[in-house]
Structure formats: C-alpha cells, structure tokens
Image (cartoon, rainbow, N blue to C red):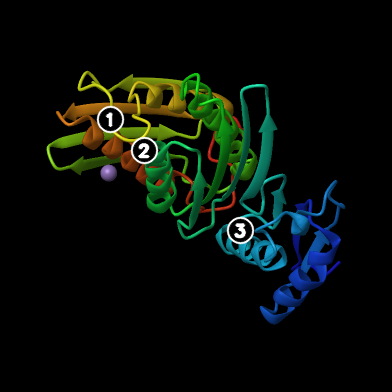
Amino acid sequence: MPASATIILCQVPVASAVVIQGAAKARRQNVVLWLQELQSDLASIPGNRSMPNKVVATLERRIAGASDRVIAISEGFADFAAKSRKTAETAIEVSVDLDGTGAVDIATGLPFFDHMLHQLGRHSNIDLVVKCDGDLAIDAHHSVEDTGILLGEVLGEALGDKAGVRRFANSLVPLDEALIEVAIDLSGRPYLHYEVDTRGGLIHGTPPFDPQLMEEFWRAVITAAGITLHITMKRGTNTHHIIEASTKAVARALRDAIVVTGGAIPSTKGVL
Ligand SMILES: [Mn+2]
C-alpha cells in the first residue's frame, strides 16, 4: 500500500469501484477501497441510475473534507435511500437523495399535503419521491402519518453514520403575516417540540386538509429518523400560511443541517 494512500472503508457496489478508482487516479490520489458487495445493487433502484457518479461525487466530497487518512463510510454514504411500506391502510414508496437539487415527484392523493412535500423537497435541496395510496375515505390521518414514518426511515438511512454533517441548524421563515422558527439537531434522539396554533381550522381544498395532521407528520418523521426538532410559531393567523411557513422553515434548517462540512462524526461520543 502506498504511504500516502487514503483508505476508504465503505460498502460500495463492485461495479462502481472502477469508476471511483478512475476518478481518484485523475485527482492523483492513491485510494484503497475496501469493497463489500451490497445486498442489492443500488444501481438497480429506479431513479438511481447515476449511482456510480453519485458514489464518486460523494466520496470526493468526503475525501476533500476529511482530516483523517482513514475515512469510514458505512450505509448511506451515497446520500440516497429508497423504501416502500404496505399495510392494510396505506401503500407508500419514498426515496430521498440528500445531495440533490430539490427535484420532487409527489402524489399522495392529498393536494395540500403534496403542496407541503413539494416545499419540503424544494427548500431542502433534497430530491424527494413520495407516492402514497391510502385509505382517504376514512381520513387522511393514516396517509399523512405513514408517509412521515417512511420518510423518516429513508432520511435516517440516507444520513447513515452522519460523518461530516453540520448536524445543528436553525431557520426563521416568514410567509406574509406568519413567522415560524425552527431548530434542528441530527442527534439520533427523537424529540419534537411543536408550538403551532392551527385553530384557524381546515385548509379548504378537495379534499380539505386538517392542519393538525402536520404535527403527526413531523412526529412520525423525527421519531423514525432520530431527529430533535423544534417548530415554534412566532406569529400568524392564516392556517395555510402558518403550515406552509412551518414546512419551509423545517426544509431550510434540514438543508443546512445535512451539509457535509468535514469527515468526522460531529459528536464527542463518536456516534450519533
Ligand atoms: Mn401555499
């Protein structure tokens, strides 16, 4: 092994290794890859055809930011995860690409919820696919909560060991008269503080949307992802504005928290 080698411990599809070695060579870096065949080839996941390029881009980012010569990258190193979940109440598919551009493909059968998930993807720069076929005839509750659970699981998987992420972030987002403050910590511990007044009632649409469901949504997301999230309404009267500003504020804070700024896991415990 060359003395100046950067050792990368990661799970990587074998097909991607050639591309990674080529990129490293072009950068005059000696990279030793420890390869482990993935259970399922990530490149076979729909919408993830650029996998080898994404692996290279992510590894280069991690290499550039790392102070260590040994970079351990476990699950989620490619910032991409996808999952599906089927129960008697809902059938859902979710994928996220944390290193995205905010491209979204959303269909939940709930136009206002779609509108919010659009905002979440767009303002966090996370590429987000959400498809939900739920028992809306009963209530939107199952669809919204189950989407939150799966989104949280996928987010947690894509974040992986969180090596190099900024971890803490906050935001203050107005929408006309509404003003929402959000603080986030990718702590590994689920905690939600939700201080949002939705007494303005239903958001009119077809079907109408009960704004109380957004508390259930965020609780499901943070519980599954292991995130500490504080959402505090500073002021506001229009429920659409309040809920939309809340979603944008979470998106902005999430965007800043997941930014990769180094190579180490940002915790004195060494694990998040
Ligand atoms: Mn709106």
Q: Position of residue 141 (x, y in %)?
A: 47, 21
Residue at the image point whose x is 46% and y is 25% from the top: 140
What residue is disc 3 on?
Answer: 62
Q: Position of residue 223 (x, y in %)?
A: 54, 23
Image-based side of 96 in relation to 87, left or right = left
What residue is disc 1 on?
Answer: 203
Identity, as a three-letter code, of the amino acid under mark 1: Ile
Pointer 3 or 2: first along the chain: 3
Q: Quadrant of ligand 1?
A: top left
Q: Nearer the viewer, residue 229 or 133?
A: 133
Note whether 229 is above or below 67 in the view shown: above
Note whether 73 is above or below 111 in the view shown: below
Q: What numbered label is drawn on residue 112?
A: 2
Residue 113 lies in what quarter of the image? top left
Residue at the image point whose x is 59% and y is 52% from the top: 263
Q: Nearer the viewer, residue 5 or 188?
A: 188
Identity, as a three-letter code, of the amino acid under mark 3: Arg
